[in-house]
Image (cartoon, grey):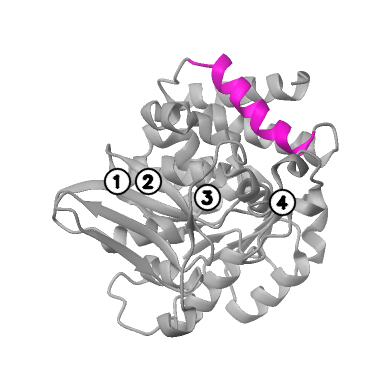
């Protein structure tokens, strides 16, 4: 397989599962965590390695190393692997997804931005989602009439904060996730609830038109639910580990134990909460976005640009959502092809970076 984003949490878990199933790693792609990359090279012996920065090449303990975005696309095209695991973060992951599909490869997709920004122009039959929520929906699907698909959210760093204090939250505050440790951007996205809106949009592209929603489940033990038209509801319980969806992406005939079962007697009780628009103002545009899913590129670009400004200290935490909503209201024309997706992405970023909202 080709693994994009090998040193992130999803990449690390993918390599654990690959070793368990004795799946060979042809290509490793990572950003700048060269120390961990060198450990992965020693253990998995890839044929090719790609990193972010050219100046780091000489620190990589491998004889076949390339750098930069174009190199990622070239190694995907040249690889003999039938599977590309895309665990890159951000819009950077879109072109690799498109290139992998054009090259006739299956994509195990953890890069949310690919479908969020460009779902209208991606053949989802070539995609196997490895987000826990989409895996959960896929796992629950039966040949029965569906009323609604539901995914769950943790609520993020500020789910228990007093509302009037959230506006003063710092970057460090956003990283204090109540349930687990993730990368910086996705943890911010969890705090704003943008992450969950992206996952709803991904579900819309993966599973087709229908009704989608999300609720908060504070222990992150239920990942998805399906309401069937007959009045019954099924739920997917599993401990929060990416290894289960990754295992199914690597081996669809999965018959091995990956996780310990959830012991409901130890859990005792579960708590569910509504996603409140005061705490998570981005939820105000959720329905309109799901009704116009091709506008996801606007939301994604605005989010990435606003987070960039937040990290620099130029705007406050609640301004992230305000910027996204402002861009969503301004840019209403939907792209009609892939080139327009990239043009619109650039235009929205410039708008957010140059305007104070």
Whichever of callouts 4 and 2 sits on the residue coming sooner in the sequence is 4
The Cα atoms of the two marked residues, 1 and 4, are separated by 33 Å
Looking at the picture, tell me which residue is in the foreground, 222 or 31: 222
Q: Which residue is mark 1?
A: 207
Q: Which residue is mark 2?
A: 203
The answer to whether residue 337 is above or below residue 251 is: above
Q: Give the class, few, some or many, for how many residues have Cα within 10 Å of label 3's Cα (few <14, many ≥20).
A: many
Q: Which residue is mark 3?
A: 111
Q: Which residue is mark 4?
A: 52
Q: Are marks 1 and 2 in contact (CB under 8 Å)?
A: yes
Q: Which residues are magenta?
A: 316-332
Q: Give the class, few, some or many, for how many residues have Cα within 10 Å of label 2's Cα (few <14, many ≥20).
A: many
Q: Mark 1 or mark 4, which is nearer to you? A: 1
Q: Give the class, few, some or many, for how many residues have Cα within 10 Å of label 1's Cα (few <14, many ≥20).
A: some
Whichever of callouts 3 and 2 sits on the residue coming sooner in the sequence is 3
Does residue 293 appear to the left or right of 169 in the view shown? left
Question: Is 328 contained in the magenta span?
Answer: yes
Residue 237 image point, x, y percent: 39, 70
The Cα atoms of the two marked residues, 1 and 3, are separated by 17 Å
The answer to whether residue 302 is above or below residue 28 is: above
Looking at the picture, tell me which residue is in the foreground, 213 or 40: 213
Task: Please tell me whether mark 1 sits on a helix, a strand or a loop.
Answer: helix
Does residue 272 appear to the left or right of 66 in the view shown? left
Q: Mark 1 or mark 3, which is nearer to you? A: 1
The Cα atoms of the two marked residues, 4 and 3, are separated by 17 Å
Looking at the picture, tell me which residue is in the foreground, 249 or 154: 154
Name the residue at 46% across, 73% down. 269
Whichever of callouts 4 and 3 sits on the residue coming sooner in the sequence is 4
Looking at the picture, tell me which residue is in the foreground, 177 or 355: 177
Does residue 39 appear to the left or right of 13 in the view shown? right
Name the residue at 74% across, 21% down. 357
């Amino acid at each position: 397989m080709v693994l994009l984003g090998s040193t992130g949490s999803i990449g690390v878990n993918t390599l654990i599962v690959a070793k368990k199933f004795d799946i060979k790693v042809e290509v490793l792609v990572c950003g700048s965590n060269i120390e961990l990359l060198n450990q992965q090279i020693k253990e998995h012996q890839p044929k090719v390695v790609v990193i972010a920065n050219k100046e780091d090449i000489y620190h990589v303990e491998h004889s076949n190393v390339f750098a930069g975005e174009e190199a990622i696309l070239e190694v995907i095209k040249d690889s003999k692997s039938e599977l590309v695991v895309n665990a890159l973060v951000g819009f950077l992951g879109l072109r690799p997804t498109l290139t992998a599909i054009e090259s006739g490869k299956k994509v195990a997709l953890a890069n949310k931005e690919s479908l969020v920004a460009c779902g209208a122009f991606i053949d989802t039959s070539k995609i196997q989602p490895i987000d826990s929520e989409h895996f959960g929906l896929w796992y629950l699907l039966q040949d029965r009439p569906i009323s609604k698909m539901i995914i769950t959210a943790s609520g993020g760093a500020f789910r228990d904060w007093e509302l009037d204090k959230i506006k003063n939250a710092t970057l460090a505050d956003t990283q204090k996730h109540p349930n687990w440790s993730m990368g910086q951007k996705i943890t911010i996205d969890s705090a704003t609830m943008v992450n969950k809106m992206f996952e709803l949009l991904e579900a819309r592209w993966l599973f087709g038109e229908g009704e989608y929603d999300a609720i908060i489940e504070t222990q992150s033990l239920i990942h998805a639910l399906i309401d069937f038209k007959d009045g019954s509801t099924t739920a997917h319980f599993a401990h929060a580990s990416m290894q289960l969806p990754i295992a199914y992406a690597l081996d669809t005939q999965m018959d091995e134990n990956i996780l310990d079962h959830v012991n409901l007697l130890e859990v005792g009780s579960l708590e569910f909460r509504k996603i409140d628009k005061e705490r998570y103002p981005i939820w105000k545009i959720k329905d309109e976005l799901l009704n116009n899913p091709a506008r996801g590129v606007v939301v994604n670009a605005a989010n990435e640009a606003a987070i960039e400004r937040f990290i620099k200290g130029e705007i406050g935490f609640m301004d992230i959502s305000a910027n996204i909503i402002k861009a969503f209201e301004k840019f209403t024309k939907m792209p009609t092809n892939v080139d327009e997706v990239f043009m619109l992405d650039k235009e929205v970023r410039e708008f957010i970076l140059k305007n104070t909202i």
